[in-house]
Amino acid sequence: MRIAIISTYTHPSRLLRKERSIMQSSVPELLAALCPPDAEIELYNEKETDIPLDRHWDLVFFSYLHAYYEHTKVLSTLFRRQGMTTVAGGRHASHFRADALQYFDAVVAEDPEANLPALIADFQRGELQPVYALPPVPPEQIPTYRYDLVDYRNNLVRLPGIEASRGCPFSCNFCVLTGHEQYRYRPIDHVIRDIRDRMIFNQRIPGVTNNAFSFLDNNLGGSPRYLRELCEALMPLKKIWGCALTFNVLRDPELVRLMGRAGCRYVYTGLESLNPESISSMNKGQNKLSEVREVIQRAFASGIVLSFGLLVGADGDTNDYLERVPEYLHDLGDHCPTFLGIVCPYPETPFFAQVAAEGRLLPGVISRDLDGYTLCHRPPRLHPSEVIDHFQRLSRALGSLHNVGRHVWNRLMTSDLPRYKACVVMSAPEVMSLRAPLANRSRSYIAGRDPIEAWDAEKMRELGLEPQRIEASSCRADPRGLARIRPRRAGRSSAAA
C-alpha cells in the first residue's frame, strides 16, 4: 500500500512562497508512525517543498489549517479524480465535517492515534467510513515520530520536533483549543527516550542545528511541576531546545533558570498585547503586563532568547495604543516581537461566538481569510481601515533592518551559556519575517476583498469548486460561552467526486 502524508501551506501574502523556518509541523512524522510497517510512505511539507501532482498513491492524508482549506480541497479533488482516496484531518476538518466530506473521502475528527489505524484497516477491507472520531488514547500511547523520514535537505535550519504534552489549561477567548482539548502530558521517560535514542538531528550547520530540537507543545508549561521534572531529566542529555509556553511560567525565576541550565535557548510566548484592556478582552489573565520588562531580562540572563507575538484588532485596541506600540517596545529594552498578526475569529472559538452575536463579522469572509493576517471582524473602537494601517505600519517598522540590528546587539552579550549567541543571531530572520505578509502590495488584508492564490482560483474554476463561506450562523455559543459549529447537511459535490 502506497501512502502520502501531506501538510499543506499557503503563504500569508497569497503569493507562491515557501517558509523554510526552524520550526515545522511534525504531523506527517506522527501519522507515519501510525501506518502499517509494510506501507510505502512519502511525506510532504508544503512549507518546504512542492506537492507532486504526477504521482499515484492508494491513500492520501492531508493535514491543514483553516486558511489552507481551499488549497487543500483543490489538491484532494485532483487526486480523487485520479482514483486516489483522500482523508482530511485537523481542527477545521473536525469542526466542518459535512463541508469537508464534499471534497475528501473521509475525515479524522479526533486525535490520530486511535483513528488512523482504524481507518487504514477499514480501507484495506473496502469498508471506509466517512468520519473517524474515536476518543484520544492515553498520553503514554503516543508513538515515537518517524524521524527517519525527515529530509533535512529541504530546509537548512529545520529542527526535529517532539511533543511532551497536548492542549492548554487556559481559556483565551480567541484560541482554537479553548473548550475543545483537554490538557495532558506524556510520561517523562518516554519523552527522554525519544530524544536520546530515536531522534535524528539536523547536522547541516554544526554548532547551530546539531543536537538541537523543538518541543511542539501548545504550552510546555501547562503544568509547572511537570516542566520542572522534565528539565531535570533533560540536563544529562546536554541538548539545546526551544518551546512555546504561557507567560505565567516565565514569572517563576527559579524555573526559568532551571530551563536555561537544561538547555532551553528559545521560548515563544503569546504576549498578544501591551494594552491591559485588550488583554482583558482576550481572557488572558495569565499575562501580567507590569512584569513584562522583568520577565524579558530574566529570560535572556538565563540564556533563553525570549520571543513573543503581538496582535492588532483586539476589542480593547485604540488608535492611541497602536500608535505607541514602538514606544512601549523601546521602554522594554528595544525588544522585538517575532510574530505580528491580526486577531482572528476562528469559528470554533468564544471570540467568534461573541463577534457573531454582536453582528461584527465582516461580510464575505471565506476560510482563506482565517489566516491571522486578514481582518474578519469590526473592532469596537477602530475602523477596519485603521486596523490595516496600523498592521502595515508596525510590520514595516518592527521588521526593519535597523530594528532587527538593535534587537540582536542589545541581547548578544547577555549570557555566556552554550549556543546562546547563535540563538540570538538566528532570531534575527524571525523578526525580519514580520514584513513577509506585506510582499503582495495588492492585498487589502480585509476579508472578502482579496482573491485567493491565482493557481488555486484557476483550479477551483476548472473543477467547479466554491470557497467555504464563513457566516455568523456558522456557530452558536453554548451556555459556557464556548463556540460550537452548527451541523450542516451537505451532499457530495459532483464536481469534487
Image (cartoon, rainbow, N blue to C red):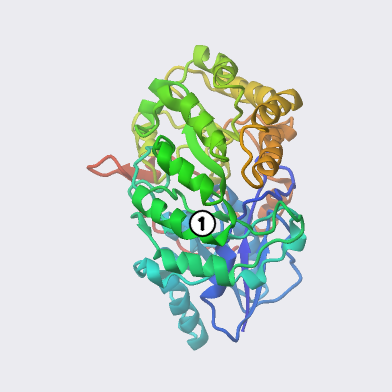
Inspect this view and state whether residue 86 appears: no
At 47% from the left and 23% from the top, the residue drawn is 274
Q: Residue placed at 43% from the left, 60% from the top?
A: 97
Quadrant of res 112: bottom left
In the displayed structure, 420 sits above or below 392; it is below
Q: Give coordinates of residue 256: x percent, y percent.
A: 46, 41
Farthest residue to the top: give it.
320
Up/down of 302 relative to 112, above or below:
above
Determine the residue positioned at 50% across, 70% down. Answer: 193
* Quadrant of the drawing holding the C terminus: bottom right
Number of residue marks: 1
Question: Against 149, is 426 above or below?
Answer: above
- In the rendered image, the residue lying farthest to the left is 479
In the image, is 396 to the left or to the right of 125? Answer: right
Instruction: Tell me residue 81's x, y (percent).
Output: 65, 71
On-image quarter of the N terminus: bottom right
Asked whether, in this view, residue 309 is left or right of residue 452, the answer is left
Asked whether the viewer can see residue 143, the reply is yes
Residue where numbered disc 1 is placed: 235
Which one is nearer the viewer's eye here, 358 or 236? 236
Q: Amino acid at mark 1?
A: Met
Which of the two residues, 131 or 319, is positioned nearer the viewer here?
319
Residue 156 falls in which quadrant of the image? bottom right
Q: Secondary structure at mark 1?
A: helix
Q: Is 339 or 404 nearer to us in this picture?
A: 404
Mark 1, residues whose alpha carbon is within 10 Å: few (<14), some, or many (≥20)?
Answer: some
Q: Residue at x 44, y 32 (%)?
A: 361
